[in-house]
Amino acid sequence: MDVVLEPAAGSLLRSRLTPPRVPADYLIRPAVQNALDRHPYASILQFCAPAGFGKTTALAALAGKRASEGHRVAWLSLESDDDDPGRFCLKLIQALATAVPGIGEDALGYVRNTMRVPVVAVMESLLMDLSRDERKVLLVLDDLHEITHSDVFAGLNRLVQYAPPGLTLAIGSRSQPPLNLATWRAKGLLLEVGQDELRLSRDETREYLARDGLQLEDSCLQSLHNQTEGWMAGVHLVSLWLRHQSGAPEDLKLLSSDKAAVGDYLLRAVFERLPADVQGALLSLGIANRLNGDLANTLTGRQDGQALLEHLDSMQLFLLPLDRDRQWYRFHQLFADFLRARLRERDPERFKQLHFNASLWFTNHHMPTLAIEHACLAEDPEMLAALVDGCGLELINRGQLYLISRWRKHVPNEIAERYPILVLSDVWTRATELSLPEANRMIDELLARWGDSRGSGPMGNQYLSALAVKAVLALQKDDLEQCITLARKVESQLGQNSAFLEGAILLIAAFAQVVRGQAEQARRLMGLAQQRNHFLDGRYLHMQQCTIEVVLALEQGQVKQAQMLIERVREQAMPLFDKRSQALALPAIAEALTAYYRTELDGLEERLRWALGRVDVVNPIDLYAQGMQCLARIQRLQGRGKEALATLGLMQTLASRNQSWRFFAMAVGEEINLILQETATDRCKRAEQRLKAIDWAKLASHYKQMPFNPVLWVQGISRVRLLQARGHFSEALHEITQLRGMLQPGWHGLQRLRLDLLAALSYQRLGYQERSHSLLGQCLVGAEREGVRSIFIEEGEGIRQLLQQLESTERQPALQVFIRGMLTVWPGQEARRSPEVLEEGLTDREREVVCLAAQGLSNEEIGQQLSLALGTVKWHLHNIYEKLKVRNRTQAIRRARELSLL
C-alpha cells in the first residue's frame, strides 16, 4: 500500500522479501535435517514453535540449501499489518515475482481497484503462472501467526490443494495456523517441525556455548539444559549473561523451569549489565519494527546510527540484519517486546515521543502505513487524523475504505469531525443505522466543504470520493433518482478524475436506470463505465457490470439471455473465485433468480442463503430484496409455508427500516398469494384483511415519478388473485386490463406473461375454453422459449389443472414435453403419484445424509460432519435418489419430508 517514492521505502520492502542472512557459525540442526531427509516428497513444511526456537534461521538455512540445488526461493516475512487480504496478496505477488520474474502480472488485476480482494482468485491466477514454469519453487511465509483473516487462509488452502508438483510451501509460525493440516497430514504432504526438532540437545548446548569460548562443568551444563529445555533464545541469553557475570554458573541452578520466567530474568540480567549509553540506545531503538541508520539517528539523537546498529549486531544483542547490504535491521521479537515493555513502564512519555518521532520519519520517507501505525502508538490523535486524511483518497481509490475505519477508532469525535476523510468513513460505517436524510446531510456537508475549495474547476478525487459514497448509500437506500443525478455530475467531467470512482458511480446509475425500466439509458451508462474500466487493472467493476446486464435481461423477460450472460461470467471469471468469495455475492443472487425462473432448484436454496449472508452496505437493496423474495418462493414450492412467511416477515422489516416501500409491497403481495394457496376455508377472508391493512396509496406516492409504479402493480395483482379465489372472474379480467396499461413496451416480459396466464384462467372458468387455451398456448410458447416454469407454479392449483387439460390436446411435441416436465416438478406431484411406503427403506447412514442435506449443508460439509470422503457422500446421495425415486437433492428433501423421514 505504501507508495514507494523513496529509496528507504524500497529497501525496506526488499528486506521483507529476502531471506535473512544465516550466520557463518550457524549450528546445523540434525533433528531438522533428519526430518527433511525422511520426507523428501513433502510439499508443505511447517516450522511451528514459540518465539526464540530459531524458526526463522532454520527456514533461512533451508532456503539457502534449496537455492544451491537450483530452486527458486520466494521469501515473505509477514507483519501484523499484512493481516488484510489485499495487502497480503500484494506482498505475496511481489515475493513470487522476485523469485520468478513475470509471475503474478495477471493476479495484480484482482488486487487493484476492487472493494474486496478475492484471495482465492489471486491464488488461482498465481497457480496458472506457476504451472507454466517447470522450475522448482520454494515459497517461505515466515511469522504466519501474524495473519488471522479467514480469506487469506482459504486462499492458502486453495494454493496447496492445486499446487503444481514443483511448488513447496514452507511456513514459520508460533501457533498452529487454521489450515487444512489434517488433510495434508493424511495425504503425506505435510512435514511438521516443532519444538522437539528445534530444541538444542545437551551436546548441542555445549557446542553453542563453546563457540563463545564458554566451558561449563557437566553439572552446570546439565542444570542449564534442564532449565532451558534446549530453548535456543534462552541458551543465547545465558551465553550473553555468562560473558558479563562472574560466578554466574552457580546461579544457573536457581533458574525456574518456566521459559517465560527464564527469559525475563535473563533479559533483565543481560540488559542491566550493559553500559548506560547502550541501554539508552536500545530502549530508543526498540520501539521500531524496522530500523536503518537514518531512523536510528532520529530515534537516538546521534549522528552515527549505521555504526551503532553494526556495533549492536556485533554484540549479538538480538539485532538481526534484514538484507545482505545490512541497511535494515530488526530486533528479535522477544528482545523487542522486553525493550518496549521496559520503556513504557519506566518512561511512558518518552515511549510516546519516540513513536511520534518514528511516525514523522516514516511520513517524510513516504511510508504512510508505518507512519500511521506509529502515530497510533504515540497516542497522538491529531497527527493520526492528519496522516489518515492525507492518504485516505488513495485507500478509497483502492477500495480499502475499511482500513480508514480501523484507524478512525483511535481518533476522538471532536478531532475527526475536522478531517473530511474521517467523516466520510463515519458515514460509511454507520450507513446501515443512519436514515437516508441523515447520511446525505453528513455527505452534503463534506461536498460543500470540498466544493468551496475547488471553485469552478474539476471536481477532484476528494470531491468525487464523497459523491461515490453518496451514490452507494443512495442505491442501498433505494433512492434511484439520487443515483442518476450524481452520475450526471460525473458525466460532465468524465475522464478528468479517478477511473475507478467514475466507473463505480456510472454503474450505480446504470443499475438505477434498470430498476426504473430505462433500458437504453442503462446501456449508455454501462458503455461509459466500460470506457473508464478499460484504464483499470481490477475486475471488480467488470463483475458488477455483468451482474447489471443479467438483471436487465431478467427485467425484459429474457431469461434465456440472462442464463447465457451468467454462463459467460462463469466461464470468464467464476472459476477463479472460491465459492465463499464475497465478490460473488451479487452475481450469485442474479444467478439464483435465473435458476428459480427455470425451476432449477437443486442446491439453489443453499447457494442463495450463502449469497444473502454476504451482502452488506456496498450492495444495492434491490437485489437483496429480490433474493429474499426468491428464497420465500423456493420455501413455498417445497411446502414450507411457515418458513416462507418468516422470510417475508424479515423482508418487510428490512424494507421498513430502509423506507424502501416497493420491497415492503413485494413481500406483502407474496404473503397474500401464500395465504390464498392454502386450503383453509377462511383463506379469502384473511387475504382480504391483509390487503386492506396496507395504505397502498401512501406507499405508491413514493414512486409516482417512475414510469412503472411497483406498489400499484403488487396491489393490482393481489386483487386479481383474490377475485379469482372468490370466483369473480369477470372482475378479475377487468383488473388485468388495468394492469396491462402499466406495462412498458419492450419491458416487463415476465409481468406480461403472468397477466396472460391469469387471464387464461379467468376465461377458462367463465366457459371461454377456446380463448383460454389459445392464450395459454401463447404463454407456453414464450415460456418454453425462455425456459420459464416458476410463474406457472406460483399461480397454484388452478393453473395446474388448466395445464393438465391442455396436455392431452396439445399437438406440438416441444410444448407437450414442456408441459409434462413442468407438471413433473410441480409441488406435491410426487406425493400424488407415489405410494406412501418405500419399496426399500433408507439406511441409518442415508437418513443422516439426507437430514444434513435438509439443513442446507453442502456435500463437503456433510463429509466433514460424518467423517466421510466426498465420493462416499455422493454415493449415498445417489442411493437416496434411487430409493426415493427422485432426480436431485431438492426433490429428495421434499420427498423425505412427505414421508416423515426427517
Image (cartoon, helix red, strand yellow):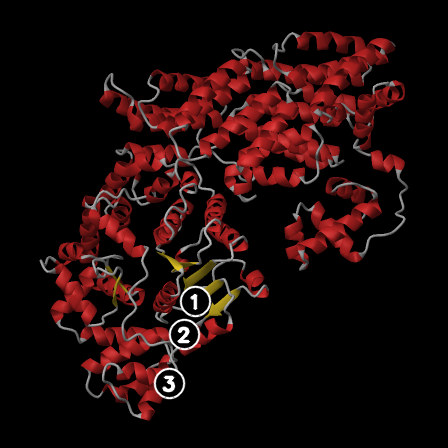
Tag 3 residue: 202
| Residue 605 seen in render | yes
Q: Quadrant of the N terminus?
A: top left
Element class at badge 3 = helix
Classed neighbour count for the residue bearing mark 1: other residues with Cα under 10 Å, few (<14), some (14–19), many (≥20)? many
Image quadrant in which you'd find residue 421: top left
Residue 198, numbered circle? 2
* Vertical comparison of 43 with 582: above or below: below
Q: Who's the residue at 70% across and 18% down the image?
A: 718
x and y percentages locating residue 675 in the rendered image: 74, 27
Q: Are marks 3 and 1 in contact (CB under 8 Å)?
A: no
Tag 1 residue: 47
Amino acid type of disc 3?
A: Arg
* Vertical comparison of 536 with 207: above or below: above
x and y percentages locating residue 355 in the rendered image: 22, 53
Q: Are marks 1 and 2 in contact (CB under 8 Å)?
A: yes
Classed neighbour count for the residue bearing mark 3: other residues with Cα under 10 Å, few (<14), some (14–19), many (≥20)? some
Q: Who's the residue at 30% across and 63% down the image?
A: 20
Out of 580 and 197, give the one closest to the viewer: 197
